[in-house]
Amino acid sequence: MPHENREPRLPSARGPVSAAVAEYLRGAGPLPRHEEVAGAAVYGDDLQLALYLCYELHYRGFEGVAPDLEWDPDLLRTRAALEHRFLSALRGDTAPHESVEDALAELLVEPVDGTGVSHYLRKEGELWQLREYAAQRSLYHLKEADPHAWVLPRLWGRAKAGMAAVEFDEYGGGRPDRVHARLFADLMADLDLDTTYGCYLDAASAEVLATVNLMSLFGLHRSLRGALVGHFAAVEITSSPGSRRLAEAMRRTGAGGAAEFFYDEHVEADAVHEQVVRHEVIGGLLAEEPHLAADVAFGIDATEHVEDRLAARLLTDWRAGRSSLRIPPTSEIPHTS
């Protein structure tokens, strides 16, 4: 896996807010003005990229950016302003369930019509679409489970033990070759994609940035630990059936053994994880802190909201025969339509 530990390069700006944040990280300019942050579209490229840049300092950072900027007070104030807009929009745009039980029950029912992204890819997706999907999802999967690890110090008892057990599996159960981020890099290699961490940031849509930013937002705030647990439950409960469909898509298109294995692994592992998350993590958390029930439900619903927006973007583009990537396809991700 080339450049596995290399810090990614700063991406191209997508507007005045992300441009100012990037220049500040380079030490070459001031942070964005309040009115620029207030005027940026909440789910748009500019705000989502700016927030992603702030969050990435807590992961691997960027090439040429001082590590100390992770806790720069001025940058944290800008991040807080971006987060406030994102979180306010999520709370306003998400249709809340009245209880955790109702939110979980909806996740456990497979839609009859089968109109989601994994359904589309299983039935009619082409190899170039699977490659685009992998390129976009690489923003999370090459650091799979890392945003969720932040919640561990904020849990105790059954919830901590259950969460740690699931994370241990995500990190390969002690085997570096089975770390899920490594397995996804192997999938990307099968698809002839660049496995360098952060390689496809410039190409990724605002919608996929929002899915990754949601995890970081919930993970980095102790006050949102309930939402992080709800988010994690939504991911684990929906992963197994979705992974089964994606594994079938990989087999149907001849994507390769490693591409199939990544999703086959998630079919089995996440079916077990679902039970642990529901009964031990959520059950343990709410036994200790029942007042967090509304936050857990919000985390589930907010996850569905950003995932629905991403699905709409991908399916609209693919059904129109065009790329879902911001950067026009090159020889690296060929477009056959």
Image (cartoon, rainbow, N blue to C red):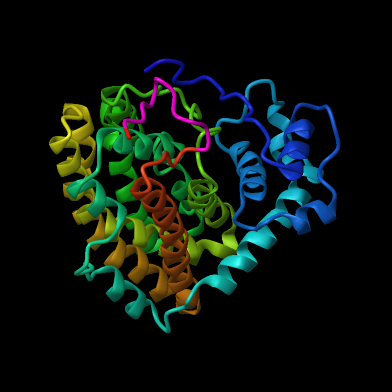
Q: Nearer the viewer, residue 66 or 316?
A: 316
Q: Is residue 80 left or right of residue 114?
A: right
Q: Nearer the viewer, residue 234 or 95?
A: 95
Q: Please report the residue visible at 25 percent of the width from the left and 51 percent of the height from the top.
A: 120
The quarter of the image holding the C terminus is top left
What range is drawn magenta here? Answer: 326-336
Q: Please report the residue visible at 25 percent of the width from the left and 59 percent of the height from the top.
A: 274
Residue 289 appears anywhere in the view: no
Residue 147 appears anywhere in the view: yes
**Furthest-top residue in view?**
2
> How far from the left and from the top, in percent, is residue 231?
42, 60
> How far from the left and from the top, in percent, is residue 303?
44, 61
Q: Please report the residue visible at 46 percent of the width from the left and 64 percent of the height from the top.
A: 305
Residue 296, quarter of picture: bottom left
Residue 189, magenta (yes or no): no
Main structural element of the magenta stretch: helix, strand or loop?
loop
